[in-house]
Image (cartoon, rainbow, N blue to C red):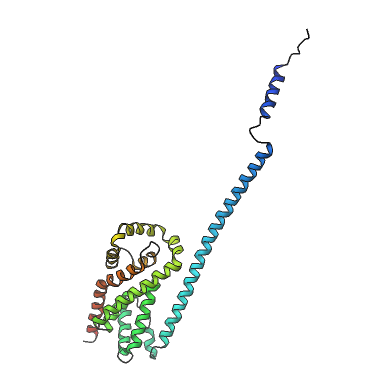
Amino acid sequence: AEEVPQVSSRTTNSYKKQDKDNINYGGTETDFTELNGKTSEYTQIRERSSHSTQGEHVGSTRKSLLFLALIFLSALLALGVVYYSFPRLEEDELQFIKVPRNIEDAKNLGKLLNLYKDKYFYQVLLGYFVVFIFLQTFAIPGSLFLSIISGFLYPFVLALPLVCLCSALGASFCYLLSYMVGRKIVEKYFPQRAADWKKHVDNHREHLFNYMLFLRITPFLPNWFINITAPVIGVPLWTFFLGTALGVAPPSFVFIQAGTTLQAHLYK
């Protein structure tokens, strides 16, 4: 009988190791290379997509701010046209033509406009109307003192509808401006406050008009915040307009009466 050669344990282990290394798991070495390449390519695509989305978001915000600036400049131009259509003022009177920041400014502006109101009634009324709406549209402080001036210049039956109409129109223009270009701005600068208010609006969706009245009468939320956020969270424009026009009446009543009292005190 032929002698069977003995295989050492080291050789056996070497064969087992080679067999283990050569096991085919359903693909070749080329398949694994291609898979790794595709995974790497997918990762790169995701990174490029993420950078692209961030870039588009920044670009969209910049475009919104640029568009807002152009609208603001156009409104300033319209305001300038109204100013130059106003009667010629004396040199010492020009210092009082400014947006009132306190009650003293309001008193001086009211006294000046009162001098021209009778002779240039429609010019003064148009100037008041345009300036009030301008301040409301761009959320610029000062409309409160203009409400006081309305009581200084006009009888109550004219002053109250005038203030309510100006407030509603200016707030609605601010609403439309925010609807066109303000969504990205609100999401960038007021995300948490907008989300919190949206929850409250959703809870009062069935009686939203009454809720808008409540917000306008009470000081829980600033008016400028309501104006720019309302279109973003889905408050209808007509509900917004009516709620503003009627909701500002009670506080405006107080401001107009203050202006009437101030006028009576100065000219008694």
Which residue ends up furthest to the top in the rendered image?
Answer: 1
Answer above or below: position of 54 versus 252. Answer: above
**Image quadrant containing the N terminus:** top right
x and y, in percent, of residue 78 in the image = 43, 81
x and y, in percent, of residue 130 in the image = 37, 80
Location of residue 129 by image quarter: bottom left
Which residue ends up furthest to the left in the rendered image?
Answer: 268
In the image, taking residue 203 as reference, residue 48 lies left or right, namely right
Which residue is nearer to you in this view: 179 or 102? 179
In the image, taking residue 145 as reference, residue 184 lies left or right, namely right
- For the point 24% across and 85% down, the residue is 266
Location of residue 232 by image quarter: bottom left
Which residue is nearer to you in this view: 2 or 43? 2
Which residue is nearer to you in this view: 142 or 243? 243
x and y, in percent, of residue 84 in the image = 42, 87
Query: Would residue 96 be seen by someone viewing this image from the given angle?
Result: no
- For the point 28% across and 67% down, the residue is 213
Q: How many marks?
A: 0
x and y, in percent, of residue 80 in the image = 43, 83
Which residue ends up furthest to the front in the rendered image?
Answer: 26
- For the point 38% across and 84% down, the residue is 95
Location of residue 89 by image quarter: bottom left
Query: Would residue 81 be seen by someone viewing this image from the given angle?
Result: yes
Which residue is nearer to you in this view: 44 or 66? 44
Which residue ends up furthest to the bottom in the rendered image?
Answer: 119
**Image quadrant containing the C terminus:** bottom left
